Amino acid sequence: MHSFTEENYLKIIYHLSQAEEGTVQTNAIANGMKTKAASVTDMLKKLSDKNLIDYIKYQGVTLTEKGKTAAIKIVRKHRLWEVFLVDKLKFRWDEVHDIAEELEHINSAVLVERLDDFLGFPKRDPHGDPIPDQHGNFEDLENIHLTEMTKGQSGIIVGVSEHSSPFLIHLEKLGLTIGTAIKIIEITAYDGSVELMMNDQKINVSKKVAEHILLKS
Amino acid sequence: MHSFTEENYLKIIYHLSQAEEGTVQTNAIANGMKTKAASVTDMLKKLSDKNLIDYIKYQGVTLTEKGKTAAIKIVRKHRLWEVFLVDKLKFRWDEVHDIAEELEHINSAVLVERLDDFLGFPKRDPHGDPIPDQHGNFEDLENIHLTEMTKGQSGIIVGVSEHSSPFLIHLEKLGLTIGTAIKIIEITAYDGSVELMMNDQKINVSKKVAEHILLKS
DNA sequence: AAAATTTTTTAGATTTATCTAAATCTTTAA
DNA sequence: TTAAAGATTTAGATAAATCTAAAAAATTTT
Ligand SMILES: [Mn+2]
Ligand SMILES: [Mn+2]
Ligand SMILES: [Mn+2]
Ligand SMILES: [Mn+2]
């Protein structure tokens, strides 16, 4: 199959292409892989040779169907393992990402299906991200970021767009976990911080935090 | 930490040193790693530099305490994951070894302890092999091979000393699974095959199979 | 539209793990 | 106790993934 490195490149390219329209740039990949642009160029040639990406020099890349399928499989595994770690092994949501980064490369189709079954076919991972089914399909959750909401609007927290431990621990401390209902009281013009109501309690959230909270209304 | 390759070398060296007295030979390792003797020599130098083995040119190797500790950790993980796959995900005992070969390299001390807890601190893996505890200790099971038993002796199957799928499937078919009580009726002089009684049923087992069945009396 | 800046690619090394073939050491056997 | 056989190590190459520095292309600014 594909090497760990190839799988990681595919996954990053997939996430970057989800994040915005158009082709994915070399530097964005280098940034995501914590490597240098020159290394990325080398790998892009390799992935292109394997028909996993469409690549034109200087023009960025897109995943082919084959590449997209491979990428989604890795994402599926990553999220299922995160559910396993939280639901079965009692890890906190801020502890599971790094372990799942390793587990996502375990290579056994049967294992993934058995795991999915064992977990009760969960639809979301501990961070609210959708889990692709065995055919690679998942609901396109039309969530909005807290920063896109307006004064007076209310919603329920359904996910986060950052998975770092410090961020998640901070949210936990604020009580802003998945399922929490909130209402926007005020958006501060000066620093973009958001004042909101949560369980009859008024709290203030910095712009940096608000940017990574996902809600449904 | 150590690379996958280093971990695999340590594990092979550990298993080989358990199997017989004295130092472990280069060719034995090459055989276990499915690689060439020259590659083994390269790696032995590296492991020696890291103080994981004691190595004298042409004289074979032994694990240092550090190396042994590392090796036992990998064995612990391998066996715990096998229990997980069989007990929780309903895999058969002949399907789990290869997946565990991958899972054993997942690098998280907490994960191992949580998994052990989740599984109820099992003492044996699905093949009857002892699972080291978190300090690396495990019972030295004084089991004997079926080929070492004598006519009239009886015992209970507690393990196997081969983990290949064809062998385990064959045993399953014969009904010779762990926990089965047997009694030796006859040992055939001509081909070394063993005739035995199992659940009021008389069956014959070839020498090749008998060599890999472990019993306690 | 030319200049400056940014992005991307190439060229040439490096590291890790592997290999084959040849050399060297150890063991076995005559 | 030498010769042959067997095991192990060295020498020199290769493939994968990475790097730095320099060259080339694309984009943005003047
Ligand atoms: Mn994650
Ligand atoms: Mn997640
Ligand atoms: Mn095994
Ligand atoms: Mn086992």
Image (tube, coloured by chain):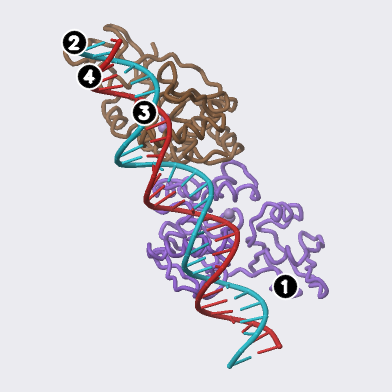
Chain colours: A purple, B brown, C cyan, D red
Residue B49's x, y, as percent?
55, 32
Q: Which kind of residue does numbered mark 3 sit on?
A: Asn
Labels 2 & 1 near each other (Cβ < 8 A): no
Q: Give the residue displayed 52% in from the left and 24% down from the top.
A: B54
Mark 1 sits on what residue? A153
Marks 3 and 1 sit apart, C-alpha to C-alpha, by: 71 Å
- Of badges 4 and 2, nearer the viewer stands 2
The chain carrying label 1 is A
Marks 2 and 3 sit apart, C-alpha to C-alpha, by: 33 Å
Disc ID at residue B203: 4
Mark 3 sits on what residue? B27
Q: Residues within 10 Å of mark 2 (few under 14, many from 20)?
A: few
Above-or-below relation of C1 to B40: below
**B6 relative position to B175: left or right:** right
Q: Residues within 10 Å of mark 3 (few under 14, many from 20)?
A: some
The chain carrying label 3 is B
Q: Give the residue displayed 46% in from the left and 24% down from the top.
A: B61
Q: Which kind of residue does numbered mark 4 sit on?
A: Ile
Marks 4 and 2 sit apart, C-alpha to C-alpha, by: 16 Å
User: In the rendered image, which quarter is residue B120 located in?
Assistant: top right
Above-or-below relation of A42 to C7: above
Does label 4 point to a residue whose CB lies under 8 Å from ligand 4?
no
Q: Give the residue displayed 29% in from the left and 32% down from the top.
A: B169
Mark closest to the chain's N terminus, 2 or 3: 3
- Of badges 2 and 1, nearer the viewer stands 2
User: In the rendered image, which quarter is residue B30 located in?
Assistant: top left
The furthest residue to the left: B190
Mark 2 sits on what residue? B189
